[in-house]
Amino acid sequence: MTPATERPNTPAPEPSHPAPARPRLIATDLDGTLLQNDKTVSDRTVAALAAAERAGIEVFFVTGRPARWMDVVSAHVHGHGLAICANGAAVVDLHRGGLPIEVRPLAADQALAVVEALREAASGTSFAVERSGGIFYEAEYPPFHLDPGAIVAPAEKLLHDGFAHADMPVLKLLAHHPELAPDAFLRLARSVAGDYGDFTRSSPSALLEVSGLGVSKASTLARCCAERGISAAEVVAFGDMPNDLEMLMWAGTSYAMANAHPEVLAATTHRTGANTEDGVAAVIERILAG
């Protein structure tokens, strides 16, 4: 979910290969991919998404964002109205205010095991707990400007059975370190706590996102596609950060944004312009013209 680096005002590059055969579904990340750096959707992208839906191609927004942060795109969801949020932990209906349709939680005891392992392996780590009804975090954790009223308490209390909101499923555990390099922190966390959850990241800082084992953008997208009789070969996916990797490798056709993380660029065979250059829209336009 990292913003792209600002670029000179030059024409956006064309996608790196001819448009694929018309897919049945387009899956796109939001931050750093579909959205501009100011978190808006450009007019060109709005038009491309609507044209894809009119052509019978389903569009799924697949993001690390929680449902309550989906207002920026809720007006641009057509047809089914569904979006995949929290890195695959929730499928929500944006036509009904982000109502959860499916939740794939991280068990509280597994989250507590991650907290214990990271406190020992990386002193200074602070945590936040993303539940279906909101986020709760430790005093040392960088606060979210979009969630100023969140409860602040130690992670062990936030994950305890007696916590006031323990009935809300845990969608993600977030872990932040003030000094470690982001990719180094991710490798360390996977090595010491990989048995308790699936680790990824989408921030330019050392901020890790932990989901339940087997929960990812890819696994939830695959379930949604299977329900529709859509194969991986019929999906075109777009992304820019490590939390997009599994989805990009699962889809039959995948595009890395020009501003993508090096691992994403290495894992995908196709490129398109940066998020600031309407890279997703450029590919959709070529698909529809083809």
Image (spheres, rainbow, N blue to C red):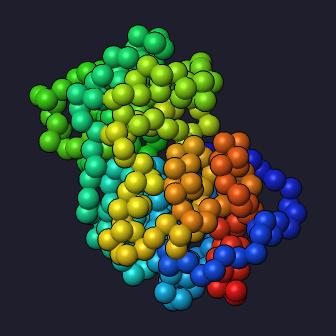
Q: Percent x, y for residue 265? A: 70, 49
Residue 47 makes an appearance in the image: no
* Residue 21, quarter of the rendered image: bottom right
Q: Residue placed at 24% from the left, 36% from the top? A: 107
Left or right of residue 276, residue 115 in this image:
left
Image quarter where the C terminus lies is: bottom right
* Residue 77, quarter of the rendered image: bottom left
Left or right of residue 67, residue 3 in this image:
right
Q: Percent x, y for residue 26? A: 53, 71
- Is 214 drawn above or below residue 184 in the view shown? below
Left or right of residue 164, residue 209 in this image:
right
Out of 208 and 5, give the one closest to the viewer. Answer: 208
Q: Of all residues shown, which one is farthest toward the left? A: 162
Q: Percent x, y for residue 81? A: 37, 74
Q: Residue placed at 56% from the left, 48% from the top? A: 245
Q: How many marks?
A: 0
Out of 253 and 58, give the one closest to the viewer. Answer: 253
Left or right of residue 203, residue 281 in this image:
right
Q: Percent x, y for residue 198? A: 41, 37
Residue 45 makes an appearance in the image: yes
Q: Residue placed at 52% from the left, 45% from the top? A: 243
Q: Residue placed at 42% from the left, 61% from the top? A: 221
